[in-house]
Amino acid sequence: MAIEIFMPALSPTMEEGTLAAWLVKEGDSIAPGDVIAEIETDKATMEVESIDEGTVGKIIIEAGTDNVKVGALIAVLLEEGEDASAIATASEAPAPTNAELPAPPPPPQSSPSAGEDVKVAQHEPASSPSPALGEGREGGISVSEDITAGEAPVDASGNRILASPLARRIAKQKELDLAQIAGTGPKGRIVKADVVNAQPVAAPAKTETKAALASVPAAAPDYGPPADVPYEEVKLPGMRKVIAKRMTESKSTVPHFYLTVDCELDALLALRKDLNAKLADEGVKLSVNDFVIRAAGLALKKVPAANAQFAGDKMYRFQRADISVAVAIEGGLITPVVKGACSKGLREISEEMKTLAAKARDGKLMPEEYQGGTFSISNLGMYGIKEFDAVINPPQGAILAVAAGEKRPVVKDDALAIATVMSVTLSVDHRVLDGAIGSEFLAAFKGYVQDPLTMLL
């Protein structure tokens, strides 16, 4: 039987992607492990491998196609002894439904620390287009990321409408209501011929009350360019779309408040200079950001209540500091995660960040390298920014905005002096963290930064 290859979901939030390139063509023989395509997500370009042996019978979605929905049929693989007639049969087969897919394995749960009365609940994954699967097989492809299947259409009563993927696509193109089409396939299933021969059904006239009309949202404002201003229209990249969606969601639904503190950097800069001199022969060069990550990890360990996220009628308090660090790349930014930052030394953090940042800029980060952080850091100090407020990265409970270190007048022992000062601002989700918790975290962070030798203990 021919094997259908569906568009995989390469991250929990992925709903569609770009089929960037096919690395095989129709008629090619492939073996398990062969890379057959490249798929561009909102975060990176991922390679898709085949786990089956066979011949590429038909490529359904051409290379370069944007906005390919997760679960869409993209190609058909013929097994040994099959000919082109099997392609039509495969195209008419129903797409796998959520009920037919194995349930995802439960994620590991961290145990509560001693002395705490903590209820360990089963993890509830974030909302995604459909239930995700762990690594494995789905339609003749192998990826290390989650895979989801397309959802079957339902009628007005919520009953599933039996229709082939091809019939669904044609119905969508012709703007036909599948609920109004009688199926001639097995068990009344709607097939291609039923949709091709069907005629559009006129929608019944709607009588809308004044109250119903009042509930309809106002039309979106016209954001067209001024008529007399020259401009260039730039297509919004997938990453930019996701950033726009998530940041709008964050500012609209998360009640932010902000806490700012100034940290003196002179002792840290002196220690950094000494350590870099000792490590120069080994090619290691610590950055201020490495110290910031280390200090944040230790502060979260010291104030675990700050390492939390809101989850409806409960919250999650994490017992490990996995810190997402914003990295600017072409078309937006991405947040690779330094896992267990509270237990890693400065050298290990520095080497890991260099590797992650390079992979981020090359678009080669794997999903597990940029998903699952518990706290975020956004550092704009290299741009000379004096102070700023960062937007929380949902579902995390806080993000630390780090500005530039600069010479400022300070008062020491009732006398005016000069010190290198860095302002940091903590953006906090007030649903899960209060001002006292945020202040305790900043006090701990400032203590590590101003007395950096304590980071080495």
Image (cartoon, grey):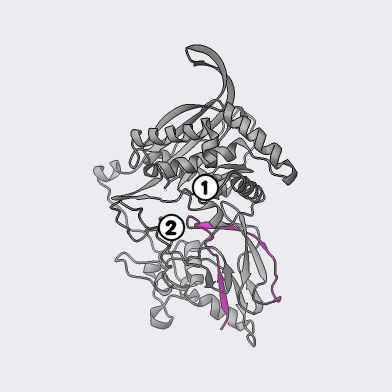
Task: Look at the image and give the residue range highlighted in magenta.
Answer: 1-29
Q: Looking at the rendering, in which quadrant would you find the N terminus?
A: bottom right
Q: Nearer the viewer, residue 233 or 372?
A: 372
When the figure is inspected, residue 146 is found, relative to residue 267, above or below; the finding is: below
Say which label, 1 or 2, has the lower sequence index: 2
**Residue 4 at x, y = what percent?**
56, 74
Visible residue check, residue 67: no
Q: Secondary structure at mark 2?
A: loop
Residue occupying the far front of the picture:
457
Query: Residue at label 1?
Result: 341
* Residue in the image at 54% along x and 43% along y: 325
**Residue 137 at x, y = what percent?**
53, 73
Q: Amino acid at mark 2?
A: Ser
Q: Is residue 434 found left or right of 33 in the rendered image?
A: left
**Residue 449 at x, y = what percent?**
52, 33
The crowding category of the residue bearing disc 1, from other C-alpha atoms within 10 Å (few below 14, some 14 to 19, many at least 20), is many
Q: CA distance from mark 1 to mark 2?
A: 28 Å
Q: Secondary structure at mark 1?
A: helix
The crowding category of the residue bearing disc 2, from other C-alpha atoms within 10 Å (few below 14, some 14 to 19, many at least 20), is some
Query: Residue at label 2?
Result: 128
Q: Is residue 43 found left or right of 190 in the rendered image?
A: right
Total labels drawn: 2
* Residue in the image at 49% along x and 76% along y: 193
Residue 23 shown in magenta: yes
**Residue 267 at x, y = what percent?**
58, 29
When the figure is inspected, residue 196 is found, relative to residue 399, above or below; the finding is: below
